[in-house]
Image (cartoon, rainbow, N blue to C red):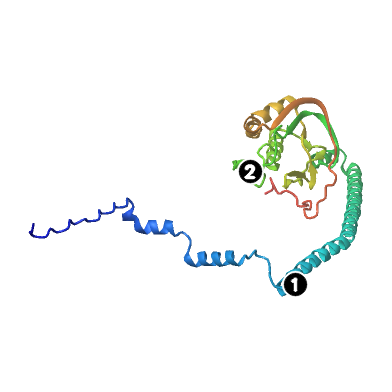
Amino acid sequence: MCGMPQQPPIRSTPARPRRPDASMSLLTNVMDHSLDDGYAEAAERKKAAGASGMPRTLRAKLGLAAGLVLAALVVTVGAAQARVAAPVVAKEREELVDRIGRETEAADELEDSVDELRADVSARQREALKHSGGSASDLVGILSGAVAVHGPGVKLVVNDAKEAASGGDGDPRETSGFSDTGRVRDRDMQRVVNGLWESGAEAVSINGQRLTALSAIRAAGDAILVDNKPLVPPYTVLAVGDGQRLSTRFQDSADGLYLNALQESYGVRTGISVEDDLRLPAAPSVTVRTAQPSTEKSEKGTS
């Protein structure tokens, strides 16, 4: 049966499904090829050559061996030099320690000599006062601190706080250079002494150091100095005067209230007691180099 030839059916290939990450082609390429091509090729060549990182030629092996020998030689020489120098350093250190010990002993001897000379000068001054003015000289000696005194008065003990240690936290009391707010300062003792004088004390001493018109209370680091002699806490202040009245007036004064504030705020320990008889030594030396007694007669009452 003749007819028109039929066209073969068209069989179209079905379209491939679209990848979910097609819109992120740059990121996909980076993830699929994370290693640079040049690095990848070098790694492949190294793997194919079987390289292990060690030199392969005889010359390279000899160079490596020479380097290792040189490093070992340097370390050995350094250790040998350190071993040889150790006795020299130890000897120098021992000589330095001995020198420090000798200088310290010499300084102690000089200090003892100064104390002896001061005591001799003080004794000569007291002897001269006895032979020059009678009762007036005794009064001058008491007021100047040139002679030892005794009598009723008060005993005031000032001590650091129990928990006193180094290290402050910006407290106003550390602005003068001290680090610990629980320690007694030189300015604290200055106020105590001034308060006692103002309250009627006739003679004052701190830890056996007699105070005079020339005395100075200052600091050196954390140490308190009285006439350049270092003191250690507790600080015992003896003041000769009318005991009960002196105690009451001092505790009611501004300086006594200041001391009480130190106790309440910083834990500084204080104690005051009235004593029937206190004995204060003479000042080590009372030397006046500039002041001279006035010989001019008073013109008061003259016409």
Give the spatial CA distance, label 1 vs label 2.
Answer: 68 Å
Query: Is the residue 59 above or below the residue 270 in the image?
Result: below
Of 119 and 269, the residue lying toward us? 269
Q: Amino acid at mark 2?
A: Glu
Query: Is the residue 295 above or below the residue 54 in the image?
Result: above
Secondary structure beneath dot 2 equals helix
Is residue 74 toward the left or the right of residue 299 in the image? Answer: right
Among all residues in the image, which is located at the extreme front?
1
Secondary structure beneath dot 1 equals helix
User: Mark on residue 174?
Assistant: 2
Of 218 and 172, the residue lying toward us? 172
Of 1 and 66, the residue lying toward us? 1
Q: Give the mark nearer the N terminus: 1 vs 2.
A: 1
How many numbered tags mark residues here? 2
Residue 197 in picture, x, y percent from top left: 71, 36
Query: Is the residue 49 above or below the residue 199 in the image?
Result: below
Residue 175 in picture, x, y percent from top left: 62, 46
User: Mark on residue 83?
Assistant: none
Badge 2: residue crowd in 10 Å (few <14, some 14–19, many ≥20): some
Query: Is the residue 205 above or below the residue 20 in the image?
Result: above
Q: Which quadrant would residue 140 be assigned to in this image?
A: top right
Viewport quadrant of the N terminus: bottom left
Q: Amino acid at mark 1?
A: Leu
Residue hosting label 1? 62
Of 164 and 142, the residue lying toward us? 164
Residue 291 in picture, x, y percent from top left: 77, 53
Q: Which quadrant would residue 80 be assigned to in this image?
A: bottom right
